[in-house]
Image: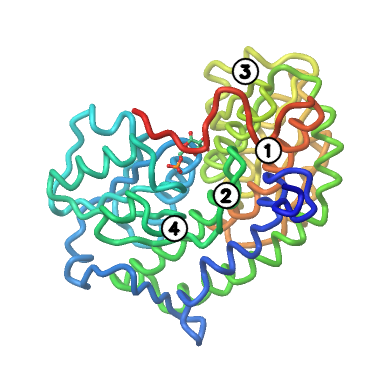
Amino acid sequence: VTAEKAGYDHFMLKEIYEQPKAYRDTMGSRISADHKQIVLEEVQMTKEQIQDIHNIHIVACGTAYHAGLVGKTVIESLARIPVETDVASEYRYRNPIITPNTLVIVVSQSGETADTLAALREAKRCGARVLAITNVVGSSVAREADDVIVTWAGPEIAVASTKAYTSQLIAFYLLGLYLAQTLETQEAGAIADVIQALEKLPEQVEAILAEAEVVRDYAERISKHEHLFFIGRGLDFNVAQEGSLKLKEISYIHSEAYAAGELKHGTLALIEEGTPVIALATQEMLFEKTVSNIKEVAARGASVMGLAIEGDDELKKSVDELFTIPKTLPLLTPALSVVPLQLLSYYASLARGNDVDKPRNLAKSVTVE
Ligand code: G6P
């Protein structure tokens, strides 16, 4: 078993450290040699079929659903197609408006999740085209979908998903760019800029991983708490949702992810002296707004850890602790900002003496509805 873990104490930690490779492998040959275009041969839709897409539904469960939340913003910003996201166990029962002009994207690490598979079948029954993003070639989801984008994360053993989630993000960036390039919703130069930033992500993740000890210290402190908050706006909120899920899954600390601007409409009541709040502030356009939300919680006694882009040092004044990630495009920050949150859950779980790789009550793949 030790050999399989390649010297790491747990599969989860090994998988966190495998992310730079997973990013590189998932991008792989899908970026043209001149770094200007996306090549997605596995998407067999013609240009006309892509032009005929009226709307997109992204359907998935758990962490894959959280990747879908980021996917929505990525596709809408780049390709300007309206996107809805649903958890698979809800999708079929709300009589969704699926037409032959709907593209349904299902996201599943295992490709075997019963709810996701059922959603895929319902979408096909309604005449939609289905594109799958999955980590398992030959899985049920991969076999039944019309188009399949494989995430080359390699086998993921830990129940808490890490490298599969980030590889799903990479798949969404590639797909969003591919749709934009086909529909000409972005200038060629803008597409090349995103590609260039994408290609820098693996080494930027390496730089974050080199700072793991800072996160470890903070994780040991929060491991003594029973509840905390994650806040953020826009994509930061979506990463907060994933960070919160990860922490709950393996540390059993209760946490809630909140859209930072919504706190004052209720949850602020739960902030008291010493409540840990992890605040993501990586979105340039929303930075000032998030800073004022941080001040709101700090004024009520919260102990805030800020997560921001390198150089945004002014945040230091408003937080107790600051963790920074390397600079990238606002759209790409989730692929970096989630990494310290994965480490945070890992070390908090470890500090509490939990079975990191096999949390209680959870299964890696849920094949019952
Ligand atoms: C289970 C796992 C989660 C995972 C979800 C969806 O609940 O514990 O970590 O995100 O299933 O799995 P999938 O294989 O469809 O991505």
Q: Which mark is residue 291?
A: 1
The residue that mark 2 highlights is 156
Tell me: is circle 1 under 8 Å from ligand 1.
no
Q: In the image, is 2 to the left or to the right of 110?
A: right
Q: Is 211 situated above or below 65?
A: below
Disc sitting over residue 172 in the figure? 4
In front: label 2 or label 3 = 2
Residue 218 appears in which quarter of the rendering?
Answer: top right
Q: Is residue 266 above or below residue 331?
A: above
> Dot 2: what SS?
loop
The local secondary structure at tag 4 comes to helix
Residue that appears at 62% across and 18% down = 268
For the residues labelled 2 and 4, the Cα–Cα distance comes to 19 Å
Which quarter of the picture shows residue 3?
Answer: bottom right
Asked whether the beta carbons under mark 2 and mark 4 sit within 8 Å of each other, the answer is no
Q: Earlier in the sequence, mark 3 or mark 4?
A: 4
Element class at badge 3: helix
**Residue closer to the observer: 283 or 89:** 89
